Amino acid sequence: MKKNKNSFYNKIGYLLLLLGILFADNKAMGQQQSEAFVLVNNACGVYPEKGSLLESRSTLNAGNGCFTTITRGTGTVFFKGHDKIILGPGFRTEPGAKFIAFIEKDSALQALIQEQQINTTILNNNNAPEKFPSAKTYISQNSPNPFSNNTVISYGVAQKFSSAQIVVYDALGRKIKQVIVPMQGTGTIHLDAAAFASGVYSYSLWIDGQLIETKKMIIIK
């Protein structure tokens, strides 16, 4: 039986390298590792917690497409966001033993939420291009981000204007909300996104028909 178990562990060694769990080997210290199992919920749960930037769907599918049984091993494995790690019944360790799960960053998503600087100009009275003073005319990255229902966006407008607004767009570029900027100076808007679905959105500051700056935000329900 012991030989069969060892053979089984060897066969899943490569799987551990793909999935993302490291069971620290504490044998040198005379400590025991878990003899039980760990369930990785790839399709049904959400991990990390809401508010984390590490959000993406795992491509791993095993069993019924929802649960994967992982036994102890020595490999280091990385999970995608949205994977849920459940310690199964019977999981146990001795004092000093370690269970470490690494969550892999989604580089594509990280790129989306990076601050985007857009080089825009306006025309002065002589129709010569004149840059907006970037230190005073701006919109900030919303906070919190990601968020579920409500977030705050700060803005600053250095010059006088006839009309200014912050416009929210969905991933397809469709305008879904517009908030009027009432006056010159700095301020904040509290964006209510309770009716929005989960996804990546953008919001832009427009002044007198000119696009000033655009940023990304992420909604997670």
Image (cartoon, rainbow, N blue to C red):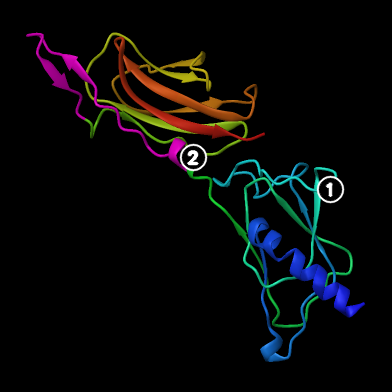
Quarter the C terminus occupies:
top right
Q: Are marks 1 and 2 in contact (CB under 8 Å)?
A: no
Q: As displayed, is residue 90 above or below residue 166?
A: below
In depth, the one of 206 and 88 nearer the eye is 88
* Residue most extreme to the right: 1
- Residue 169 painted magenta: no
User: What span is colored magenta in the figure?
Assistant: 108-133
Q: As displayed, is residue 187 above or below residue 43?
A: above
In depth, the one of 151 and 188 nearer the eye is 151
Q: Which residue is at a point 63% across and 30% down the rendered structure image?
A: 198
Q: Residue 150 at what x, y percent from top left? A: 57, 32
Locate residue 96 relative to residue 216 in the image: left or right: right
**Residue 207 - label:** none
Other-residue count near label 1 (Cα within 10 Å), few / some / many at <14 / 14–19 / ≥20:
few
Question: Which amino acid is tagged 1?
Answer: Gly
Q: As displayed, is residue 220 above or below residue 193?
A: below
Locate residue 75 relative to residue 186 in the image: left or right: right
**Residue 63 - label:** 1
Quarter the N terminus occupies:
bottom right
Q: As displayed, is residue 178 above or below residue 48?
A: above
Question: Which amino acid is tagged 2?
Answer: Ala
Q: Which element carries disc 1, helix, strand or loop?
A: loop
Q: Residue 191 at what x, y percent from top left? A: 52, 26
Picture quarter containing residue 77? bottom right
Q: Residue 178 at what x, y percent from top left? A: 47, 15
**Residue 108 - label:** 2
Q: Residue 143 at what x, y percent from top left? A: 48, 39
Locate residue 83 relative to residue 205 in the image: left or right: right
Q: Which residue is at a point 49% across and 19% down the rendered structure image?
A: 169
Q: Which residue is at a point 19% across and 15% down the rendered structure image?
A: 122
In depth, the one of 38 and 134 nearer the eye is 38
Q: Which residue is at a point 57% across and 47% down the rendered structure image?
A: 54
